[in-house]
Amino acid sequence: MRTISAGDVELSTLTLGRPSETTTVFLHGLVAGNMATWYSTVALPLAASRQVILYDLRGHGSSSMPRQGFDLDSHVDDLCSVLAELLPEDAKVDLVGHSLGALIALQFALRHPQRVHSLVLVDAPMPANHWVGPSLLAANSRDGVATWIDEQPHLAKGVTGRRRERLRQRIETLVFDTSLVADVLAMGRPPAAALAALNVPTLLSYGRLSPCLIVGDELLQALPNAQLVLLDAGHDVPIEAHAALLQTIQTFYAAQHTASLAQSGAR
């Protein structure tokens, strides 16, 4: 574990595996997510053959809780700080993100396409102001946060006792004491031209029962080098279908490696 300073926030990071040609960076989802979302089920198996970086987003897990900066560009700046500290300058990375983490990965790729070897976008809820904003607005009082957690199955499942109370406290702080809700409500759709120009190999993985499944089809049409794989899950794919997701990512990486060897041989 290593803590990295990124402007107004301290980010908790974890590096697994040995340095390799490309490094996979995992980005978790909003509110209930942290690096543990990925650690044992997907990141650790991948670390057997490549370097893997995980970190807690600002306001999540063991990272610090700033009062502002929950917009996508601030999250991208945080990711830039993590990469600058842990990898050689301008090193290319494979990004894997779930939910908000997928939107951060996509925004990073739009800003720094030369730094991205591939993208895995897992149930990206684009635009967040449509798919995520209404849920956050439903937590409309501090006293109602506990009830709101009960109404979010992916939050309440398996979380009891002190863990549940810590979750409630963090959600209350994020929703009522930071700019999180306002920042999410400002997260619109990237320009169509920017998506069309992003020629990065992209795996879109969505749950068949996800409420934002339609976004997978939209991104498949918008991105020039994308493929879509559906898994038997709802929105919380890394938890509900982690074995299938791991296999899907490994297959995607193997295909990218084969394509890279073919290109090298053709030169």
Image: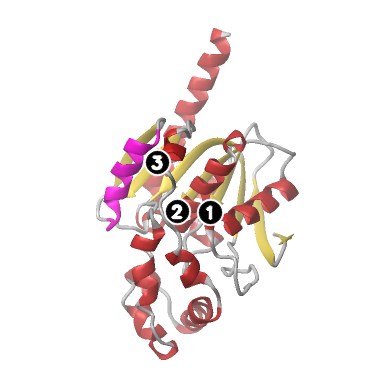
* 213 part of magenta stretch: yes
Give me the C-alpha separation between circle 1 and circle 3.
24 Å
Give me the C-alpha separation between circle 3 and circle 2.
21 Å
Say whether residue 207 is visible. Answer: no
Name the residue tied to disc 3: 192
User: As shown in the figure, which amino acid type bears the numbered disc 1?
Assistant: Leu
Q: Nearer the viewer, residue 259 or 241?
A: 259
Q: Residues within 10 Å of mark 2 (few under 14, many from 20)?
A: many
Secondary structure beneath dot 1 equals strand
User: Are discs 3 and 2 less than 8 Å apart at CB?
Assistant: no
Q: Residue furthest top?
A: 266
User: As shown in the figure, which amino acid type bears the numbered disc 3?
Assistant: Ala
Q: Which mark is residue 27?
A: 1
Which of the image's four quarters has the C terminus? top right
- Report x, y in % for residue 101: 49, 55
Q: Earlier in the sequence, mark 1 or mark 3?
A: 1
Secondary structure beneath dot 3 equals helix
Q: Earlier in the sequence, mark 3 or mark 2?
A: 2
Height in image: 263 above or below 143? above
Name the residue tied to disc 2: 98
Which of the image's four quarters has the N terminus? bottom right
- Report x, y in % for residue 31: 47, 69
User: As shown in the figure, which amino acid type bears the numbered disc 2?
Assistant: His
Seen at 68% across and 66% down, the residue is 9
Q: Which residues are magenta?
A: 210-223
Height in image: 123 above or below 151? above
User: Are discs 1 and 2 less than 8 Å apart at CB?
Assistant: yes
Q: Give the dominant element type of the magenta stretch: helix, strand or loop.
A: helix
Q: Nearer the viewer, residue 196 or 99?
A: 196
Seen at 25% across and 50% down, the residue is 208
